[in-house]
Amino acid sequence: IYLRILPILIAVFLHIPNAKPTGEELYTLYCSACHGVDGKGATGGAFPPLAGSPWVHGNPKRAVAIVIYGIHGPIDVNGKAYNLEMPPQGAALSDDQITSILNYVNTAWGNKGETFNRDLIRVTRSEFASRDKPWTAPELLKLFPLPEKQTALSD
């Protein structure tokens, strides 16, 4: 893990002008302490996984809104209940950083999501600019329902 964050630390401390960390490096720095390096939830699954999570798929504004404003209270991820606080990251992370992190999450660990672009982050920030507290799962699900599970009987 130290080798993954070393380039970021060097860039930060030396202020190397063109050193732009990758989405994986940013994820490792800002997200892996809770969601795990493998996306399965840190500390043996005490935190919600991002690998294979329906919360990562579907309307991309849901993921953007969670990263920018955070989420609190009970949430069900893949049939397991969590009741933790994810602090808002919108003030700490730029639109480019959020784009890189979400693009990494959407393509890592077998996730096959669409790619994000900086404009989506900007538009989502603007759309919810008056929001001053973290989301709850019911609020997000009302705006951005989870994708329906495909089963053998779906067709």
Image: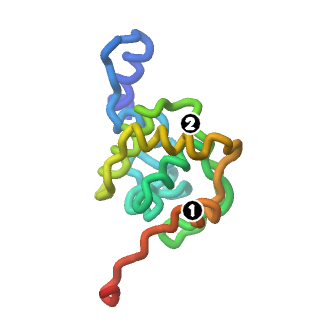
Q: Is residue 1 left or right of residue 41?
A: left
**In the rendered image, the vertical position of residue 149 relative to residue 99, given as above or below:** below
Name the residue: 67% across, 45% down: 131
**In the rendered image, the vertical position of residue 94 relative to residue 66, given as above or below:** above
Q: Which one is nearer the viewer's eye here, 139 or 50?
A: 139
User: Is label 1 in a helix, a strand or a loop?
Assistant: helix
Residue type at mark 2 is Gly
User: Where the N terminus falls, by quadrant?
Assistant: top left
The image position of residue 6, as x and y in percent, is 36, 24
Task: Return the mark for residue 143.
Answer: 1
N-terminal-most mark, 2 or 1: 2
Identify the coloring: rainbow
Name the residue: 38% across, 17% down: 11
Residue hosting label 2 = 90
Q: Which one is nearer the viewer's eye here, 150 or 110?
A: 150
Residue type at mark 1 is Leu
**Which quarter of the picture shows residue 4?**
top left
Q: Residue furthest bottom?
A: 153
Image depth: mark 2 or mark 1 in front: 1
